[in-house]
Image (spheres, rainbow, N blue to C red):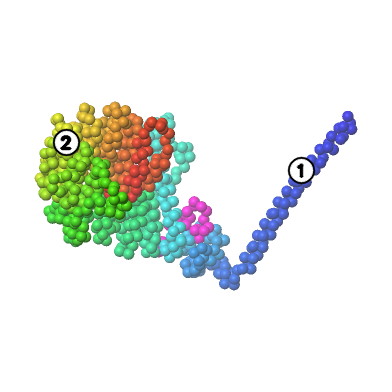
């Protein structure tokens, strides 16, 4: 047993010895690495000392001497030393990727200069020393301390650009941080004051929302507005003068004073500034985007670029700004051109009689025909000219097949290619044979295409359409009613021919649903964007009646959305939401025309962005996929053409989702609409019309 006890430890000795040897080897390696690091540092320092030229050594000695003299007992010597130090820093020339040598050699003396500043009693010397410390703090101050700005505010002021562009950029970053910090501190102080007042009212025993630390310490809050003179009077002019307008705009937006940019804009930098403002407006949240565009409008108006300013005012749908721009422009030709622009967008402010006549659109047929004559395109084209059928290789024996679907396609092609010319080779020929080559709804489309062919020609076009209103075929008659609305779209006439002709087909009675739908859509197209109360009085009873067929209600909703586009009309929005909530959910999801009700609601908030929030809350109460589709449609219409990046990203995310569904289910309406919604939210011209 004794021998066993003696031999047991000896069996463990090899393992213990191996571990101890490894530990010693590891320690030796660490010591070797530390020694090599120290050697490398020593060699590096020695090498740097050897690399220092005689000029650099002389500059180092000069900086040391100036630092020493900055604490001299004689005021004049201190002033001369600081003047020479500032001159060396300002005149230092170096590459953009390295620190100027005076700053580099003054780094070790930063703490010493700070001590000199604390002990200095002469105000003049103290101001000069603060300026130097503000520049040195760019590279020496700790992160988050903002010492460069602190010493700048304590310094002598003056031209901030004298210290170089990089210094001003660094100062701008610290200004933004300090401004936000002061605002946050002011908010905390206000919360503390309210809590203290509440505690005083409730009594000494009431619980307080203020923490113990906040109650024990009183922090003096510096107003954030004290930073504005430095920003507006010194930094922004420097940035603009040195072609750094983007940095000036960013700084002014950080402090909430973007309107201070206007005095610094001239003909040389206007284009760059406005281009940057338009891009910034797409990335900032509401209502800052509208404020950015307002500044752009002010800048453009200041320099007399009224058409460009008018486009932005139309994007904002700001009627007051539109009226101001039209009144400020003194050039008659430019004013007329802007009146034509307003007419195209369906906006008609109160102006003089001549401009009102331009905005009424009665000039359109004449000008359009004159343009076609100048371009030599007055000769009507046929669908075959578009299809290029003569280039197709067909057997000589192949006979042409008269297809109703092909004829319908040709009807649409003919209407679009000859729109507004008042002549074609299919519909306006004697006998109207083409009309009867279509079937049912195809005949309705063919009759409605007359409105496109005769667009804007109220006097001559209505005469040619009138005969179709007396046809016995319901499809042709409904198409003629729609043609009346298409013809009057974008045109204002004192006689109100569209309202006079279509009203009787919309009023309650035994009117055929198809005729009623054609008349209602005709009214919507004829008075698009006008917010005409007579149309509201006609169509609201149709929407509110639960006995009305869903297809008729859908067409009435779409027409109301067109007429009151962008008006945020609460009564119409509530009526359309009531239709979606009160009618049978299964029937709504089954009928594809339900989507037109959602589109009608969305058109009410076209381009209105945040004003759609109440309607979105109402849409959440709509059950099923119809509610999801309505929510998506409302949001899309509200942000149409704004270029809002956050909305576009969200819609693209929806478009990329793949929902799990049964084989018998149709595509989910909300997801199916997402790609089109993303396209609508992307930046582009105003789409209200």
Residue sitting farthest toward the bottom: 54
Q: How many labels does the image show?
A: 2
**Residue 560 at least partly seen:** no
Residue at image x 28%, y 54%?
Answer: 390
Disc 1 from disc 2: Cα separation: 102 Å
Residue 511: tell me if it is visible.
Answer: yes
Between 616 and 444, the one lying in front of the other is 444
Of residue 112 and residue 598, the one placed in the foreground of this image is 598
Label for residue 19? 1
State the residue in front, 50 or 286.
286
Region rendered in magenta: 136-159
Note whether 508 is above or below 483 in the view shown.
above
Location of residue 332 (image quadrant): bottom left
Up-down relation of residue 674 to residue 207 (above or below): below
Q: Indicate yes or no whether the magenta region holds residue 143.
A: yes
**Quadrant hosting residue 589:** top left
Q: In this view, does 596 lie to the left or right of 469?
A: right
Residue 688 spot, x, y in % from top left: 25, 46
Residue wearing tag 2: 474
Q: Earlier in the sequence, mark 1 or mark 2?
A: 1
Considering the image in quadrants, where does the N terminus appear? top right
Q: Residue at x 15, y 32 (%)?
A: 511
């Amino acid at each position: 047993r004794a021998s066993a006890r003696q031999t047991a430890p000896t069996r463990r000795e090899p393992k213990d010895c191996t571990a101890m040897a490894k530990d010693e080897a590891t320690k030796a390696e660490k010591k070797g690495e530390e020694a090599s690091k120290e050697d490398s540092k020593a060699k590096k320092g020695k090498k740097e000392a050897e690399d220092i030229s005689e000029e650099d050594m002389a500059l180092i000695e000069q900086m040391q001497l100036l630092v020493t003299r900055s604490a001299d007992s004689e005021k004049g010597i201190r002033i001369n030393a600081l003047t020479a130090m500032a001159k060396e820093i300002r005149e230092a020339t170096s590459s953009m990727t390295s620190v100027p040598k005076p700053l580099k050699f003054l780094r070790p003396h930063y703490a010493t200069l700070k001590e000199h500043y604390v002990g200095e009693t002469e105000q003049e010397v103290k101001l000069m020393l603060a300026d130097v410390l503000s520049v040195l703090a760019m590279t020496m101050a700790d992160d988050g301390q903002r010492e460069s700005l602190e010493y700048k505010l304590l310094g002598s002021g003056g031209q901030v650009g004298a210290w170089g562009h990089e210094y001003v950029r660094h100062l701008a970053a610290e200004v933004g941080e300090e401004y936000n910090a002061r605002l946050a501190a002011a908010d905390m102080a206000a919360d503390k004051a309210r809590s203290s007042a509440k505690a005083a009212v409730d009594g000494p025993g009431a619980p307080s929302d203020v923490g113990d630390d906040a109650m024990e310490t009183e922090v003096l809050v510096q107003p954030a507005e004290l930073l504005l003179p430095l920003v507006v009077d010194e930094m922004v002019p420097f940035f603009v003068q040195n072609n750094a307008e983007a940095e000036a705009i960013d700084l002014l937006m950080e402090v909430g004073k973007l309107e201070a940019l206007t005095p610094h804009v001239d003909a040389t930098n206007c284009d760059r500034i406005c281009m940057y403002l338009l891009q910034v407006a797409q990335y900032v949240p509401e209502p800052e985007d509208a404020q950015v565009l307002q500044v752009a409008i002010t800048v453009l108006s200041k320099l007399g670029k009224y058409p460009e300013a008018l486009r932005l005012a139309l994007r904002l749908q700001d009627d007051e700004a539109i009226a101001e721009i039209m009144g400020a422009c003194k050039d008659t030709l430019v004013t007329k051109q802007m009146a034509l622009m307003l007419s195209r967008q369906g906006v008609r402010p109160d102006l003089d009689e001549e401009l009102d006549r331009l905005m009424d659109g009665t000039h359109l047929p004449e000008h359009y025909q004159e343009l076609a004559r100048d371009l030599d395109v007055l000769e009507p084209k046929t669908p075959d000219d578009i299809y290029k059928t003569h280039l197709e290789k067909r057997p000589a024996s192949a006979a042409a097949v008269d297809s109703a679907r092909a004829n319908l396609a040709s009807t649409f092609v003919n209407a679009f290619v000859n729109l507004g010319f008042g002549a074609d080779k299919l519909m306006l020929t004697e006998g109207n044979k083409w009309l009867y080559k279509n079937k049912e709804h195809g005949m309705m489309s063919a009759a409605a295409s007359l409105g496109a062919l005769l667009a804007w020609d109220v006097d001559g076009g209505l005469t040619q359409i009138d005969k179709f209103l007396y046809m016995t075929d319901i499809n042709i008659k409904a198409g003629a009613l729609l043609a009346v609305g298409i013809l009057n779209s974008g045109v204002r006439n004192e006689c109100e021919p569209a309202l006079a002709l279509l009203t009787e087909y919309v009023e309650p009675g035994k009117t055929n649903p198809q005729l009623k739908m054609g008349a209602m859509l005709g009214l919507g197209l004829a008075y698009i964007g006008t917010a005409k109360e007579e149309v509201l009085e006609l169509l609201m009873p149709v929407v509110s009646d639960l006995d009305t067929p869903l297809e008729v209600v859908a067409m009435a909703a779409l027409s109301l959305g067109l007429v009151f586009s962008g008006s945020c009309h609460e009564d119409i929005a509530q009526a359309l939401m009531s239709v979606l909530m009160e009618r049978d959910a299964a029937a709504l999801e089954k009928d594809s025309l339900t989507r037109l009700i959602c589109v009608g609601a969305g058109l009410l908030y076209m381009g209105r962005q945040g004003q759609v929030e109440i309607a979105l809350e109402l849409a959440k109460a709509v059950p099923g996929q119809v509610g999801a589709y309505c929510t998506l449609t409302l949001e899309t219409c509200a942000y149409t053409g704004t270029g809002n990046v956050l909305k576009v990203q969200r819609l693209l995310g929806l478009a990329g989702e793949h929902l799990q569904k049964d084989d018998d289910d149709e595509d989910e309406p909300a997801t199916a609409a997402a790609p089109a919604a993303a396209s609508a939210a992307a930046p582009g011209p105003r789409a209200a019309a």
